[in-house]
Image (spheres, rainbow, N blue to C red):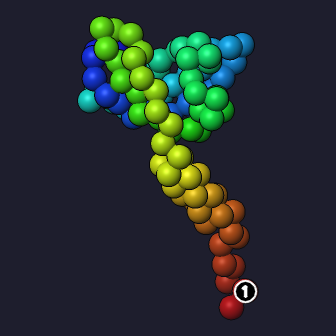
Amino acid sequence: MLPDGTYTAIVDRIEDGIATLEVDTEDGLSALDIETAELPAEAQTADVVLEITVTDSALADVTPEPEETADRASEAQRRFDRLSKRPPQDDDT
């Protein structure tokens, strides 16, 4: 488990009732597996940004961050759109 504190986490995936969170720590990213039931209903899907609090080596609070989730999705879409454009060819001028 993570040291006590508040962290930003992203729901990476949910499989067989287990949610894997990617947690941003001082040492980089860390994975945390929890029961999906420990997440609020609106956070039980991939790519949701959360603020989590760990107290006494246990998950004490999980708060979805809808604005951060929307910003992350928008940025991912912009990157995808930029990458999906065909580069100009010499004869396209």
Residue 52, given in percent of the width and then of the height, sits at 41, 27
Give left or right: position of 70 versus 51.
Answer: right
Give left or right: position of 16 versus 79.
Answer: right
Residue 74, given in percent of the width and then of the height, sits at 58, 58
Number of residues whose C-alpha sits closer than 10 Å to that of mark 1, classed few (under 14), some (14–19) or many (20 or more): few
Q: Amino acid at mark 1?
A: Asp
Answer above or below: position of 10 versus 37: below
Task: Please tell me which residue is depicted at 50% across the width and 51% down the height of the picture.
Answer: 67
Answer above or below: position of 26 versus 58: below
Task: Please tell me which residue is depicted at 53% across the width and 15% down the height of the picture.
Answer: 33
Quarter of the image where one finds residue 9: top left
Residue 19, given in percent of the width and then of the height, sits at 60, 20
Pointer 1: what residue? 92
Quadrant into which the N terminus falls: top left
Of the pair 51 and 76, the residue shown nearer to us = 51
Give left or right: position of 71 versus 58.
Answer: right
For the image shown, how many numbered marks are present on the structure?
Answer: 1
Quadrant into which the C terminus falls: bottom right
Label 1 SS: helix
Task: Please tell me which residue is depicted at 42% across the width and 15% down the height of the picture.
Answer: 59
Q: What residue occupies the far bottom of the structure in this picture?
A: 93
Quarter of the image where one finds residue 36: top right
Answer above or below: position of 59 versus 70: above
* Observer able to see residue 88: yes
Task: Please tell me which residue is depicted at 39% across the width and 17% down the height of the picture.
Answer: 60
* Observer able to see residue 83: no
